[in-house]
Amino acid sequence: MSTGNTTHASHVAHHFRDSEHQFDSAKQGIWLFMATEILMFGGLFVAYIIFHAIYPEMFAEGASHLDWKMGFLNTLVLIFSSLTMALGIHFIQVGQQKKAVVSLALTILCGAIFMVVKYLEYTHKFHLGLFPGRFLNPEVVHATHQNLGMYFGLYFCMTGLHGTHVLIGMGLITWVMIKTIKGDFNPEYFTPVEGVGIFWHIVDLIWIFLFPLLYLVG
Amino acid sequence: MGNHNSHGTTHTHHIVPFKIYMMTAGALFILTFATVGFHQMHLGSLAAPVAFLIASVKAALVLLYFMGLKYDNLMNRVIFGTAFFFLLLLFAICALDIWTRISEISTL
């Protein structure tokens, strides 16, 4: 019964009932992906909490090497980027393409600011000799605790994995921004932007927990 | 075929009002300043619970409004809930293991 089916819009693949069916299926796939993301970062969080409970003084020493102002700045940057990402989708939904492109561009800019701050933090740590695991020489950094490398192992794994997500997210947002400029999206079809948006928000969500965990509580 | 709803295939997406997004972001900014504010007060043993309580509220705001779970279908909420449940299970079982161990000093 496909002949003369005017309700089957051009962007809907033939195996979907309608546009909504296709959108919901795609979004469900993204949420399944988010479940794996939550559990992947969750494993690292659990590792951090447990080793923190075993070596509280060593973790306090590790956290004292971090500058909370840098983490605070990055938290504000990521929250703002989450807002602009959400607004990017909102403007596509209401048919305001130019505003959507500006919002997505601002989101990429915020991602870049975040990575620059991370770069400055990382290079400062390397300069001081604060490397992960066995690469940290306790004598060089005048460490009170011989296993201080464990703290920085967790620090670099968690922020490194998160930073990788930010970079991938920036790439994905660039992709949907170019597609928006080309006019590929409209209020009826914007599935890729929605999916990328959910991914970007979970990156923000993870940072919301990483900031107090690493920088404040220590 | 023939089970199209009265709206057809268009305008089925829930459009979250602009104002809701601005209010969500506003709340997130305020809570971020609150996190740092409480940190400066040096609450001692309460510092960690307070910081993570605020972080949880922020996470809930992001999930409900930015990620749209408040307006999403039951399936996507269940997917998130399942992941979250297994995360809690992972933590609970690990915690039980670590904190019920009896440390013994080897006599060797």
Image (cartoon, grey):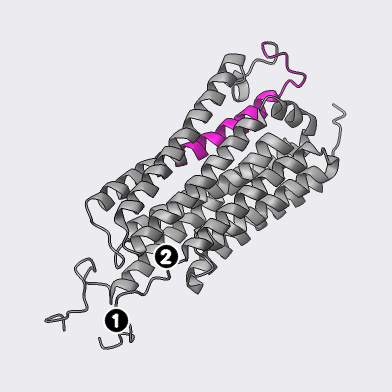
Q: Residues within 10 Å of mark 1 (few under 14, many from 20)?
A: few
In the image, residue A35 sits, relative to residue B7, either above or below, namely above
Question: Magenta segment: does it hold A159?
Answer: yes
Residue labelled with disc 1? B8
Where residue A114 appears, x then y in whole percent?
50, 35
Q: CA distance from mark 2 to mark 1?
A: 22 Å
Q: On the picture, is A60 further left or further right than A116?
A: right
Q: On the picture, is A19 further left or further right than A77?
A: left
Residue labelled with disc 2? A28
Q: Given the image, on which type of amino acid does mark 1 rest?
A: Gly
In the image, residue B64 sits, relative to residue B52, either above or below, namely below
Q: Which residues are magenta?
A: A140-165
In the image, residue A146 sits, relative to residue A113, either above or below, namely above
The N terminus of chain A lies in which quarter of the figure? bottom left
The answer to whether residue A27 shows anywhere in this view is: yes
Where residue A32 appears, x then y in whole percent?
46, 60
Nearer to us in this view, A195 or B90:
A195
The C terminus of chain A lies in which quarter of the figure? top right
Query: Residue at position x 46%, y 66% from top?
Result: B16
Where residue A196 appears, x then y in whole percent?
39, 52
Query: Residue at position x 47%, y 61% from top?
Result: B18
